[in-house]
Image (cartoon, rainbow, N blue to C red):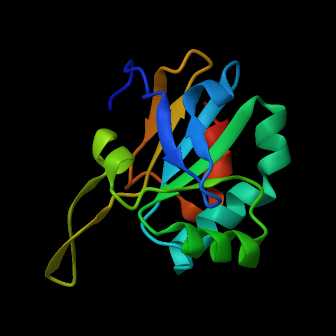
């Protein structure tokens, strides 16, 4: 996915198995953020920063949906533990991650493995990708400010 592309209608299933569709957010800006793993330090910092600024983001017309490849049960625990007010898509088959181009080979300490590149897509009211915040640009502890600073 790149700026100007139309996002897919079916985004996936959330932590409760409910299908999330792009049309659910018609008339709103959708922050679709991909993160590597529930309950890790960076991902928790990012989710909690979005949680703490959720009312301001919504006031500015944004809705938030997180996406990672963990299953529904993992997402339920992550949401419960951190009181997250937004849904998390369980992209266990990596369909959405592949569509958006955020699944690929990563390397840490010289070890190569497949994983999710932390990336945020801002999708406008018409379902078009308007902005992309890339992995090296994301500040997990201050992510909401990055989204609001258009």
Q: Nearer the viewer, residue 24 or 28?
A: 24
Q: Which residue is drawn at 53% across and 28% down?
A: 123
Q: In this view, does 51 lie to the left or right of 64?
A: right
Q: Tell me if 118 is positioned left or right of 31 in this view.
A: left
Q: Is residue 62 left or right of residue 104?
A: right
Please name whichever residue, 133 or 77, is drawn nearer the observer in this view of the structure. 77
Residue 80's spot in the image, x, y percent?
Answer: 75, 74
The quarter of the rendered structure image containing the N terminus is top left
In the image, what residue occupies the spot 70% across and 18% down? 27
Which residue is at 84% across, 34% downward? 59
Q: In which quarter of the image is the C terminus?
A: top right
Q: Where is residue 34? Give x, y as percent.
A: 46, 53
Picture residue at 48% right of the left edge, 34% below the top:
10
Q: Write down the quadrant of residue 46 in the picture.
A: bottom right
Q: Where is residue 50 in the image (x, y as percent from the top left)?
A: 70, 55
Please say whether residue 146 is visible from this viewpoint.
no
Q: Is 130 drawn above or below residue 18 in the view shown?
A: above
Based on the displayed image, in which of its 4 quarters is residue 3 positioned?
top left
The number of callouts visible is 0
Residue 131 position, x and y percent, is 47, 30
Of all residues, the one furthest to the top in this rendering is 126
Quarter of the rendering containing residue 6: top left
């Amino acid at each position: 996915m790149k700026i100007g592309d139309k996002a897919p209608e079916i985004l996936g299933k959330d932590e409760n198995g409910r299908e999330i569709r792009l049309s659910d957010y018609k008339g709103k800006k959708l922050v679709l953020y991909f993160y590597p793993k529930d309950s890790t330090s960076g991902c928790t910092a990012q989710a909690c920063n979005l949680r703490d600024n959720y009312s301001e983001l919504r006031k500015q017309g944004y809705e938030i949906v997180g996406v990672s490849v963990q299953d529904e049960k993992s997402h339920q625990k992550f949401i419960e533990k951190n009181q997250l007010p937004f849904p998390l898509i369980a992209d266990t088959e990596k369909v959405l991650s592949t569509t958006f181009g955020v699944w690929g080979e990563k390397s840490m300490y010289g070890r190569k493995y497949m994983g999710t590149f932390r990336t945020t897509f801002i999708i406008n009211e018409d379902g078009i990708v308007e902005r992309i915040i890339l992995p090296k640009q994301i500040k997990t502890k201050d992510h909401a400010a990055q989204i609001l600073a258009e």
